[in-house]
Amino acid sequence: MHLTLRVWRQDGPGVEGRFETYEAAGIHQDMSFLEMLDLVNERLVTAGHEPIAFDHDCREGICGSCGLMIDGRAHGPQGSTATCQLHMREFSDGDTIVIEPWRATSFPIVRDLVVDRGAFDRIIEAGGYIGAPTGSAPEANLTPVPKETSDAAMDAAACIGCGACVAACPNGAGQLFTAAKVAHLNLLPQGQPERWMRVERMVETMEEYFGSCSNHGECEPACPKGISLDNIALMNRDYLLSKIRNRKLGGQR
Amino acid sequence: MLNLRRAGRERVRRAPWIVSIYRTDTGKKYAMAISGVVLLLFVLGHMIGNLHVFEGAHGGTFRIDEYGEGLRDLGEPLFPRTMVLWAFLRIPLAAAFLIHIHAALALTRSNRDARETKYQSPRDYLAARYASRTMRWSGVIVLLFLAWHLADLTIGVEAVNPDFVRGSVYHNLVASLSRWPVWILYVAAQVALAFHIWHGAWSLFQSLGISNPRFNRFRRTFAHAFATVVVAGFLAVPVGVALDIVS
C-alpha cells in the first residue's frame, strides 16, 4: 500500500505546531497502525530527520498508552479498538490519513502526538481506591458479589484510561473515564465504605480539569473498551446522592 | 507541567448547600435538567391550550378567549384574580428560563476552556447528533422567538402587532399569523424547538441519573414522541391559519 500521512508535528509543549506530509510507500496491510508509524520513523531517522513522537507501550490494547486522532476519530475508523490494535487493512491504497494528538486543555501536548494525561491520575488519586488490609490475601469467597453486579463492575473496570473519551467529546469532558472508575468501585461491596466520598471527590477533581457532559454520546463509540454511557448516569446519580446522604448512616443498608 | 485550569481560583467561602451544588458543572446539569422538565411541561401545557383554537366560537365568544380568561381566573375565589397565574405559573416559569440560560452560559464557557486549542483537522462525529451539537443555537432561536412572541401575543406591543386587542386571543393570533413573514417565523421557531426538546427530553434522564437497563430504550422513544407531539400540536395553529380553518 502507498499512503500519504498528514501528521501533527510540534517540537515541544506550548510551541506552534504544524501538519507535515509524509509519503509512506510499501505498507503491508497486516501491519498495525503503530508498526506503520515505526516504519515511517525508521525511514525518517535514516534520512537524518527527527522521528514522529507517539505514545505506546503494550501494543496489545490493554495499557492505554497509545491514542491518536486518526481522520477525525479517536483511535481511528475501527470501533472498540485502541490505536495499536488498528491494522492497515482498514485503509485502502492511496489513502491520505490525517493524524492529530488528543486535544484538550488538560492534556497538554508534550511533543508531536504525545500528550500528558496526568489529569487522569489526579482523578484516580482523589478516590479511585478502596480501603483493604494488605498484610495477607483475603479469603477468596469472603465477600459474595451477585453475578450481574460483578459483570457490570468488570465492564466498567475495563477502562484503560487512554483518554479517547475526552478526545472525542465535543466538550472535552472526562465523564466517561471518571464514571467508569466510579462505577467500577461503587458497584462492588468492597467499594461501599468510601462510596459517597469517592464520587464527590472524583467528580469535583474531574471538573477542575475537564468540560461538562452534554450527553452527545460521542465518547461511547470512541472508547476502545466499549464503556457504556450508563456509567455516567450512575455517576450523576451517586454524585447527587453524595450531597444528600447522611453519612453517619454509611454502615446501613 | 500539569495544566491546573482552575487551580488559581481561591477556594470560595462556604456557600449554602444548594448553591454549592449549583457551583459544580454536574450541579448545573441537574439545574439544566430540572428547569428543562419545568419548561417541557410548560410547552406541553401551552400546546394543549392552543388547541382550543379549533373549538371555534360558542355563544359569541371564542373558546380560546374563554380559556385565556380562565387562566387569569385560576384559583378564584380562593385566591385573588391572576394571583395563581403569576405566583404558580409565570414567575416559576421565568425562574426556570433564567436558571436554564445561566447554566447553559456557564457550561458553554467551561466546555470552551476545556479545549482551548481546537482540532486542526475535520472531526468525524459518530454519535453526536445535529440536535445535540446545536443546542445553544436552537436555544438562542427559541429565546429570540420568545421575545417576539411575548411582544406579539401576550403584551401586544403596537410595533409588533398593531391589531392587538387585549383578551381577544383568537382575533390576535389570526391577525398576527396572517402576515406571511410572521407565519414563517413561527414555523421556523417550532422547528428549532423540536430539535431542542428532542435532545433535552432524552438528555435529562442521563443528567439526573435516571437509568435502568430495563427502561433505557424507552428514554429515546419518549424524546421522539414528546418532541413530535408538542411540535405537531404547535404547528397545527399556523397550518390552520394558512388553510383558512382558523380565520
Image (tube, coloured by chain):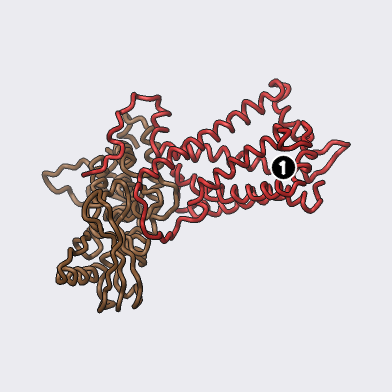
Chain colours: A brown, B red
Vertical placement of residue B150 versus A116, above or below: above
Q: Is residue A27 left or right of residue B199?
A: left
Chain under disc 1: B
- Tell me where residue B1 appears, x and y as whole percent: 21, 44
Residue drawn at 71 percent across, 33 percent down:
B157
The quarter in which the N terminus of chain A is drawn is bottom left
Residue furthest right as drawn: B59
Q: Is residue A179 something that shows in the picture?
A: yes
Residue drawn at 38 percent across, 52 percent down:
A169
- Tell me where residue B92 appears, x and y as whole percent: 58, 30
- Tell me where residue A130 appears, x and y as whole percent: 23, 42
The quarter in which the C terminus of chain A is drawn is top left
Vertical placement of residue A9 versus A48, above or below: above
Considering depth in this image, is A236 or B43 the residue closer to the camera? B43
Considering depth in this image, is B237 or A198 the residue closer to the camera? B237
Displayed quadrant of residue A84: bottom left
Image label count: 1
- Crowding at dot 1, Cα within 10 Å, few <14 / some 14-19 / many 20+, comes out as some
Considering depth in this image, is A241 or B232 the residue closer to the camera? B232
Vertical placement of residue A28 versus B41, above or below: below
Q: Is residue A151 something that shows in the picture?
A: no
| Kind of element beneath mark 1 | helix
- Tell me where residue A71 appears, x and y as whole percent: 36, 64
Q: Is residue B214 left or right of residue B186?
A: left
The residue indicated by pointer 1 is: B50
Q: Is residue B201 left or right of residue A131?
A: right
Which residue type carries mark 1?
A: Asn
Considering depth in this image, is A158 or A249 the residue closer to the camera? A158
Residue drawn at 66 percent across, 26 percent down:
B84
